[in-house]
Image: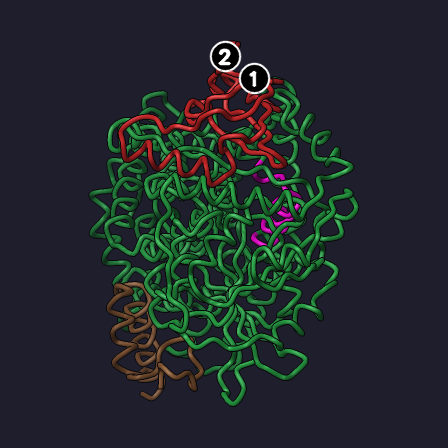
Amino acid sequence: MTMPERLMNLAHGRKGLRGTVAKVEGLGPESEAAELERRLLEIGFVEGASVEILHEGFIGRDPIAVRVDDMRVAIRRREAAAILVRPA
Amino acid sequence: MIQILATYLIVALAFAWVSWSVLLPSRQRARVRALVRPGKRTNCDGGCPRCD
Amino acid sequence: MIAGTLAPTRIALVGNPNCGKTALFNALTGSRQKVANYPGVTVERKEGQFLTPAGHRVQLVDLPGTYSLRARSPDEVVTRDAVLGRLDGEAEPDLLLCVADATNLRLVLRLVLELKQVGRPIMLAVNMFDIARHRGIGIDLDRLAAELGMPVVPTVAVRRNGIEDLLNRIDRLEALPAGAEPQRWREPDAGEIRAAHREAERILKLCVKPPARPDDWTNRLDAVLLHPVFGILILLAILFVMFQAVFTWANTPMDLIKAGFDALGAWVVDTFPDGMLRSLVSDGLIAGVGSVLVFLPQILILFFFIILLEDFGYMARAAFLMDRIMGGAGLHGRAFIPLLSSFACAIPGIMATRVIDSRRDRLATILVAPLMTCSARIPVYTLIISAFVPHRQVAGFIDLQGLVMFGLYATGILSALAVAFVLRKLVWRGRVEPFIMELPAYKLPNLRNIATGLVLRARIFLQRAGTIILSMMILIWFLSSVPGPPEGAVGPAIDYSFAGRIGHALEPVLAPIGFTWEIAVALIPGMAAREVAVAALGTVYAVSGGEEATGALGQTLAQHWGLPTALALLAWYIFAPQCASTLGVIKRETNSWAWPSIVFVYMIALAYGAAFLVFHAATALGA
């Protein structure tokens, strides 16, 4: 018996959120979505990577600083919306 | 007289330089370079099989 | 390696940003570096030479850092094309030397896998090996070499460790004629990137033992430097110190340079026979180039801070902190550094926009960079403020002159943000470029690297001053002194020249904003560089002593102009595109005449409008 998966959008995460990347999926029009997906993958947001929100910006808590495996990445919440996280 | 000639020469050189480096589109510049030094490509000291 | 040929072996340095690639480049080539632009594009091409122990000549090219060959920014396009041998006039590299940060191998492994498809010989330098060892990261180099199928060499570039081993390995490489192995690279799709990640992950698990001691320093520093409140305060404090340094430390060397050029000019005047040539050399060449070279100390101090903060890893944090503020105006977080540089001079600022991925973001930054108050405006501001604004305390402790100066700076910044905002809202609507950026681990800056970087910056600036700026100065001298005054003329010589005629022709246009014909005439040579207008005003008003006699010139101006005219001229100088070099750089960077023309037109329009408003408001208020 498995629990239904509870996935969370990284864009809605608050400081301290930890988890693993469950899905990376581009947003918006098709060409833009594909491009965003590849960029996120290239910088390390790939399914299975462990992530943690380390810091938030001071206006609208945006952008966020995220630990991705052993590196840190700054990303706007707008782009972070393409990343679904399975909270730890 | 020589003074005036020299002055105009310097001004003409300056004008040529500005036209060459700023006014001329870089594609044309590359084309002119290729015309002046046929066979020899930029940044090559020669000796490579495909250049010479 | 390539025995029997005289041609140098060509090695290209590739790697992620912040992996210590430039430090390795410096360690290998020392000071034997040269910087040029790639033909047709305006990305800097950094190249150096060195000899291997076996006596092979090697030509090393430092390529811009990238995570992938799938290029987006002009920088990354150069990396891709150089690696693939697609660049005009450049052969394929004989060896790809990939540089990895030993503490952060995951992403570079994926890049290495991508580079392997290019079909050129490849070698991996695992840099910052000492830091990795210190943190207890165990890297099985032999295993890594076997898994990747390429030589792997540990290095500590900043201490020149491992360089010898690297050179010996280069000597032992077999030459691979171009085209011997097929070039299989093409843009990977998302699925292929995922597959490469899995492969990198597999190799990582096999060869790398995770750190025993995590990087606590970076976490602790980030807790303060990225703090929503303290982070911003610290950023402001750093900027404050930077500006203090730019404007106070630079004073002595600037005075020295100026005195040197003045002495040189005086020597020419004394030695050469009177005539056109003497005027060209002393007024055109020496005074003109001197007026630009005088900014070298400020530019170097500014770059000292920028390189220091960049090396330390802070610049990415600054972009993080500023992204939302700049984003509100439609600018990218990365535009922060170019705009900051523009406070010294718009030229290095505009060249620094190359780090911005998206063309629109880059253009928006280039368009507003000249609105930042560059230091060439300072002589003009100081002259007018000291002549027209009384030395008085406002609200008990603020100096009125200082307040006006601050207001001029603030107006420049706010109008840059406003212009960017309008561009975003009206011209380039819709699509917002993503902001995704690595925050590198903090590292102690290396003094030798900073010195190498500064020497490079100085060389680039001097090269510009010696070529483009020099020729522009000569042309502007020509406009301001030919034709010469007729026999028995009484007015200043510039009055009879082309510049004088243009000035007189412009007078009716400039009259509504309160400018006299003398100002109009001075604005023409002021196109060379803003502060040249000060000297030109001196010439027009026949104040002897030129720039040194600012006090005397100020008094003369105070007699000739009303306060509305002076204020209008200040407003004009906030916006006016009075710098031929900046327009030239924009032309080169955008490779089109459209953008410098747009900059010129919009800035002239703003300048005219602002001066008009200020002049009439001041007149109406009875000032």
Same chain assignment for discs 1 and 2: yes
Identify the disc placed on residue B25. Answer: none
Name the quarter where the N terminus of chain C is drawn: bottom right
* Residues at marks 1 and 2 touching, judged by CB atoms closer than 8 Å: yes
* Side of A17 where C291 appears, left or right: left
Which residue is depicted at the point 72% across and 53% down?
A: C129
Q: Secondary structure at mark 1?
A: strand
Task: Pick whichever, C43 or C498, lies toward us.
Answer: C43
Q: Give the residue at mark 1.
A: A87
Residue C305 horizontal/vertical position (percent): 63, 46
Task: Pick whichever, C499 or A53, lies toward us.
Answer: A53
* Side of C600 where C103 appears, left or right: right
* C312 inside magenta stretch: yes
Q: CA distance from mark 1 to mark 2?
A: 8 Å
Q: Give the residue at mark 2.
A: A6
Question: What letter labels the chain drawn in red?
Answer: A
Residue flagged by tag 1: what amino acid is it?
Pro
Residue C325 horizontal/vertical position (percent): 47, 26
Magenta-drawn segment:
C299-316
* C516 inside magenta stretch: no
Residue C534: in sight, yes or no? no
Question: What letter labels the chain drawn in brown?
Answer: B
Residue A28: in sight, yes or no? yes
Residue C272 horizontal/vertical position (percent): 48, 82
Considering only vertical position in the picture, is C587 above or below C484?
above
Q: Earlier in the sequence, mark 1 or mark 2?
A: 2
Label 2 packing within 10 angstroms: few (<14), some (14-19), many (20+): few
Colour representing chain C: green
